[in-house]
Structures are given as structure tokens and as C-alpha cells.
Image (cartoon, coloured by chain):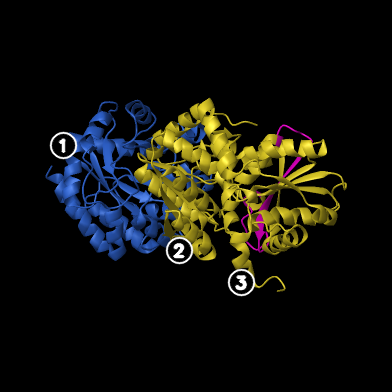
Chain colours: A yellow, B blue
Amino acid sequence: MTVQRESGRFGIFGGRYVPETLIPALDELEAAFDTAMEDVAFRTELDRLLADYVGRPSPLSEAPRYSQLVGARVLLKREDLNHTGAHKINNTVGQALLAMRMGKKRIIAETGAGQHGVATATVCARFGLECVVYMGEEDMRRQALNVYRMRLMGAEVVPVSSGTRTLKDATTEAIRDWVTTVRTSHYIIGSVVGPAPYPRMVRDFQAVIGREARQQVLDRTGRLPKTVVACVGGGSNAIGIFHAFVGDADVELVGVEAAGEGLDTGRHSASLARGTPGVLHGTMSYLLQDAAGQVHPAHSVSAGLDYPGVGPEHAFLKDSGRAMYEAVTDAQALHGFETLAQLEGVIPALESAHAVAWITAQAGRWRSDDPVLLCVSGRGDKDVAQVMEMGILGT
Amino acid sequence: MSATISSEAVGARFAALRAAGRKALVPYVTAGHPDPERSVALLQGLADAGADVIEVGVPFSDPLADGPVIQASSQAALAHGVTFDTVLDLVHRARVAPPVVLFSYLNPLLAAGPDALARAADAGAHGVLVTDLPVGADPERERWFGEGPLAFIRLVAPTTPAARMREIATHGSGFVYLISRLGVTGMRADLPVELPDTVQRLRGVTALPICVGFGVTGPEQARAVARLADGVVVGSAIVRAAGESVDAAVALTRSLRAAIDTV
């Protein structure tokens, strides 16, 4: 499935549900993006930065001890080894280059866990762009170290105290800024959400993950993976790794959402599992909402998954049956965090730990030589203090 | 029959004003703010104080086009359990003479179901304005609004190019809502310098009445806007006053009326 460019839709999902003020800017952005992606000079510069600055291609690691536990050949796509420690920078490098092509020198971003905020602050420092990051007060508390990192690199971090004080409200506040400063600012959305062209554009910047991984798995094993697994909040690392495999009908695509304290407790972030179609932040997708259409607060132990919506292309992939979406709880994710650390010496981000936990729970599902591709979307250093505070692990 | 009467009430009101050489005063309130009971009294008070059209906000959890005052009023209304049906009940109970235009985000309207617009018309609403449904965004749902029983008021922004202004005007009815400035709703000290020019450009492409909103704070600004446009929308200033008391909001409305009538 490729998006219909004119409508910016994935089936019935996606679209541009924004105030009129932003329409000309979205038109401009879409035109700039489409032109840039066909411009050899732009592609060359992007590839060079991804190689020399981000450190791509990211490695594909064998995970022998974890594989033994699961009963499959688990291969780790190491987005945690990118500069800034997560996949987020693939997108911010691309969008920053685009902003400069459009002559915009002020960058706005929202952040949940802080990884996208850090990735945005990083490229702004690199290119000399002004950077303003909106972050929920609750997330600033959970991710104090990332707040410091952003400020260290010269970004202004604006606390958001409305609503749930998390990613949802940070995004709303970032959009309010953009409506006000649209003539001079570019808004770098961190996931495959928001109005068109963002879901398609962020996907295309993240698709490098799957392009590399598909070739790496083929080179390593001589076949395609049986299953590709990634965590889903907004869903950018998942779309990034899925995209290259969508046409490979035999490859199973699995997105893992945050079931929080349990799908039946009402305290989770599983928009695909338990949401209904609705409109938030400019796009039509599955959404956690009440019967009156008011958005329901999400919950997850991981700030990066703590979002009541999900990218519209995931909604489409779910309804079309091409991808399957599962959910694991906070407790399972914490177990996944510990498992990968102890068996492989890789501390995954709590977000990525959801994908780990799902694979662990599926032990026995595969043949021992079946390649299972796991996207380690980020590293868990940012989460160590939080997990330590929770006193979960027996130390 | 009732469908036609609902949607035409807004246009009829502007035609009458134009014939009398007067400008429209369009106050905005958030339904259910400060609380449902006072909300009814507020609507009646605004009507008595000389409102020509009343915009009634349907509260939404994530009002991304709104500034702090309307955000807070929406949160207060939601905390009182206000839903779309509550909004219709308030409109129905208030039974005000001026046409009522619902001001909403798309999601609560979608959640209210396919008969939402018919129910709104039955409750006494005459128009609807959807802040996050720009022209061309969703033809199917735009048809739902455009072919329904309510006038479908569309918005034009300072960033809207002339060709698109024409398209917007063609797809709307009742009046055109011109957003005076970049940004969210809320009170500002001055009017944007390019406003007269924007109004002129819009006049060149539509015969619909033009109302200007976003950032109109008090009588002086209202008078200045009334000189340019057919109507003045005042939102945050009214909502802030309503947060103090219904009387304060009514008094502000009277002073706005007086200011506009000197134009």
C-alpha cells in the first residue's frame, strides 16, 4: 500500500484535519518533500549525514542466548546504536534538511520520552537552527536527563502543564505554536502521526531501517525473516522497519502496543487494540476516546508509547490484515527490559522492551532456524533511573 | 421544511442587518461554562444584550486552535460532564431569538452520530462551524455538513491564498469567518495591520457576509473591526468575563453592542 498522494490517506485513515491557517504550510511542505526526494543532491546529502553523523547502517546483531530462550533465530536491528540512541534521528535529519530548503530557521518539536526532542535538538545544533521543544511536565520529571541534554545542545524546552501533561498535550501545544509562527517555523513531528504529509514523510525518512534490515537478513540467513516485530506508540520505528516488507506476503508483521496495567483496566495505550476511529492532531486513525468523542488519557510505563492515537498507516495495515497488532503490559515490558539486558548485554528502551516481551511470550511459535527480526528502536540508558526507582529488579 | 428554515436563519439575520445598515455582534461562549445552569442564563443574557448571532462552543478535550481562556472553559465544561447532547439541551432550554451557530472540533460531532446535525436543528441551532475541517480535507464529511439542515460556516485564515479563499466561500453558507491573525484564539492588544487588506481580498471573491474573529478584546477593537467587516466575533473576552459572572459577560456584550452601533 502506498498512500494516495492527493488525499494523504491510507484507506479511510489519515487526512488533514487542521485549522485553515496551516493548510498552505502543509501544501508547501508536501511540495518541498516530494521535490527533495527526487533531487539527487538532497538524497546524497541525506545519505551522507545518515552515514557520517548518525552512524548508519545500524548493525544487525545475532542474539544467541535470547534466541535459545525463544526457540528462533532472533536478529536485533540496532537502532539503539544510532547517534542519540534511537531511531528518531533518521527523521529529524531529513526534516531539518527540508526545513532549510524551505528557508525556515526555527524548529518546533514535541516529545514524550525525550528521544525525539533530543534528536531534534541535536540536528538543530548541527545546522544552527533555533529549537523549541514542548514536553509534558510529567514526562519532564520522568526523563530529566533528556531535558538536560536538550538544553545542553541549546534547545528551549517548554513545560506543558495542560491535560495529562504528557505527549498528547505536548503535541497539542506544539501545533498551537505552529499555527502562530507558521510563516517562519517548521514543525518536526516525531512520529507517523499528524496531518498529511507527515505520516508518509516520516515513514519515508524511517524506511531506511527496513531497507537495511531486509538486505542484512537476506545476506546473513539467505532468506527473509519469518516475523518482523516492533513496538508501536505513534508507530514510526514500526512503519520504518515494516515498509520494506509490506510487499513480502510471507513475512509476518507484528506491532506491539502498550497494554499498560492491562487492556481491561482502562489504563493502557493500546489504540489499535481498544480504540475506535476518530480525529486527533490532524489525522483520522484509531483513538482512545469515550462515547462522546473526548480523547481518553493513555497510560504506559514508557513515556514514548504514552499516546492515545496511532499512525494512520498502522490503522490501515490493521484493518487490511497485512499487519497484526498485539499488546503487552508494563510488567511484561519490564521483564523484557531485564531479559535482553541479561541475555545479550543490550539494554533496550522501555518502548522496544515491549517488542522483546511479545517475542518472549511467543516462545515455541517458530522453528529454531526461523529468522525473527526485532527492532531495538532505542537504548534503555534513559530508562535506567526510572526502572531503578521502581525497585522492580532484584538488586 | 424545518431544515431549510434552520440553515437560512443565519443568512436572513445578516440580510436584515445589512438592510438596516448595522453590523453583527457575534459573541462566543463555551457550552456548559461556567456550569450548565449558568450557561443557559448566559445565552439568554447575551441575546438580551444585543447579540445578533451566538456561537456556542462544543467542548473538546484537545482544542488545538484555542488559547488558554477557551481551553480552560472547555475543561471546566467537560468536568461538568457536558456532552454534545448536553449542548443541544442547553440551546433548547435557552430558546434565544438570535441564530445559534455551533462551534466545534470534528471529533465530538462524529461521535454524536449520523443524525447529530438533524438533532441540532431540532434543538434550535442554525449553523455549524468546524475548526479542524478545512475545505477539501474530507469531501464525504464536508458533504454531510454542507447538505445538512444547518448553515455550514467555513473559515478563512490570513495565510489563505486568494484562489483558495474563493473555493472556501463557494463551499460555505451563512457567513465567512475570517481569522484575523496567525495563532490560537485569545485576547491581543492590537489588530493586525494587514487585516483591512485581507478583508478586501475576501470581499473580492464572495458575496457572503464576513465576520472577523480571533483576538478581538474590547469595544475599541470591536468598533475598528466593524468598520471593515459585516460582523465581529468576540470569544475569549466574553468567556473570561463569564468566568467571573454572567452579569459581567452581559455587561461586556452591551458595551460591545454600543461600540459597534456607533460605526
Residue that label 3 marks = A389
**Magenta part of the chain:** A245-272
User: Alpha carbon of mark 1 to alpha carbon of mark 2: how far?
Assistant: 42 Å
Number of numbered labels in the structure image: 3
Q: Which of B184 and A243 lies nearest the eye of the viewer?
A: A243
State the mark number for residue A11.
none
Residue that label 2 marks = B79
In the rendered image, residues at marks 3 and 1 fall on the same chain: no
User: Which quarter of the picture shows residue B5?
Assistant: top left
Crowd tier of the residue under label 1, counting other residues whose Cα lies within 10 Å: few below 14, some 14–19, many 20 or above: few
Q: Residue at the location (36% across, 50% down)?
A: B56
* Amino acid bearing label 1: Gly
- Spot occupied by residue B226 in the image (x, y as percentages of width and height): 19, 41
Q: Residue at the location (20% across, 59% down)?
A: B251
In the rendered image, residues at marks 3 and 2 fall on the same chain: no
For label 1, the SS is loop
Residue that label 1 marks = B21
- Spot occupied by residue B190 in the image (x, y as percentages of width and height): 21, 48
